[in-house]
Amino acid sequence: MSNILYGGISETATVIGRRGFVKFLCYTTGLVGSTWVNSACEMSFRNKSNVLRPFEPILLEHSDGGVMIESPMPNLPLAYVSRNEKKIFVEYESRISVSVVLAAHISVSSGLWRIPLFGEDVRVPIDAGDPLREFSEHNISEWNPVALAQKGDYRIQRGLPVEKEISLQCVPILPGKGWVSGGPWLVNQCGGITQKLCREVFTSVGRGVRHDSKAYRICAGTGKATEFLSWVCPEV
């Protein structure tokens, strides 16, 4: 049971998804070789059963100066809401069930999705023409899986909220951006094998330290407080 709660996808599929993401990252940034890829395997996740398993995260510098904890999915999600693009990418067969999970209203006249922002009262109706909460619909095949997530983005996949612990101790930011430490943080993330739909939002999980030295594995001494972001299941 603990294995099912932890994963929800096979470890082989996880490796394929991660390698594909890192390969793209190396290509676009000019990062060469496997040293940084291998040293990106420093975070462990622990579920409620206290079973430790390596998850090999990828830490990237976010556009706002924070650090994003990215764990690429091997398969397309059922839906992805991009705040910056004002688009929802969705699998057509799942659009109705996805709209329920997002508490969204799909306009009959315009086809636009009206989706509440993270933390808002979903019982409050959204007026037509709201520029922050209206999204055009696109097929999930058009979504770019290696695009960096932004705060407030949603993704929908099959699974259940599973409590996990994130602990980072002197972990590299790709590619060659220095070293960070943070946590432990307890968060709920989608996992498990089920047909139920699970929603995650990209948001802050806490603050840690970005170490001053960029020398290999030098994490002692002073550092700068840094925000860490990842995918989390909202409580409501």
Image: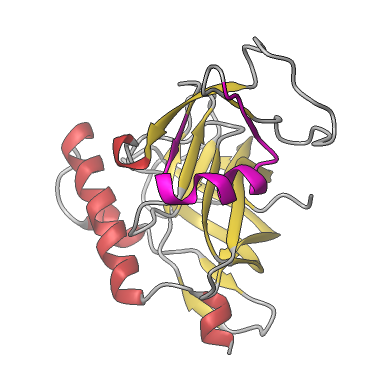
Residue 132 visible from this viewpoint = yes
Q: Is residue 186 left or right of residue 195?
A: right
Identify which residue is drawn at 78% across, 52% down: 235
Instruction: Tell which of 162 and 143 is nearer to you.
Output: 143
Q: Is residue 229 left or right of residue 60?
A: right
Q: Is residue 142 above or below residue 155?
A: above
Instruction: Tell which of 176 and 147 is nearer to you.
Output: 147
Residue reaching furthest front? 109
In magenta stretch: residue 211: no
- Colour scheme used in the picture? secondary structure
Q: Is residue 86 above or below residue 140?
A: above
Identify which residue is drawn at 68% across, 59% down: 187
Q: How many marks?
A: 0
Instruction: Tell which of 35 and 49 is nearer to you.
Output: 49
> Image quadrant of residue 106?
top right
Q: Is residue 122 left or right of residue 73?
A: right
Image coordinates for residue 11, horizontal then vertical, percent: 35, 75
Image coordinates for residue 191, horizontal then vertical, percent: 55, 68
Instruction: Tell which of 150 and 54 is nearer to you.
Output: 150
Q: Is residue 71 left or right of residue 102?
A: left
Residue 208 visible from this viewpoint = no
Image coordinates for residue 25, horizontal then vertical, percent: 25, 41
Residue reaching furthest bottom? 1
Image coordinates for residue 211, horizontal then vertical, percent: 53, 42
Identify which residue is drawn at 62% across, 11% down: 131
In magenta stretch: residue 93: yes
Q: Quadrant of the N terminus?
A: bottom right
Q: Is residue 133 above or below residue 228?
A: above
Q: Which residues are magenta?
A: 88-108
> Image quadrant of residue 223?
top right
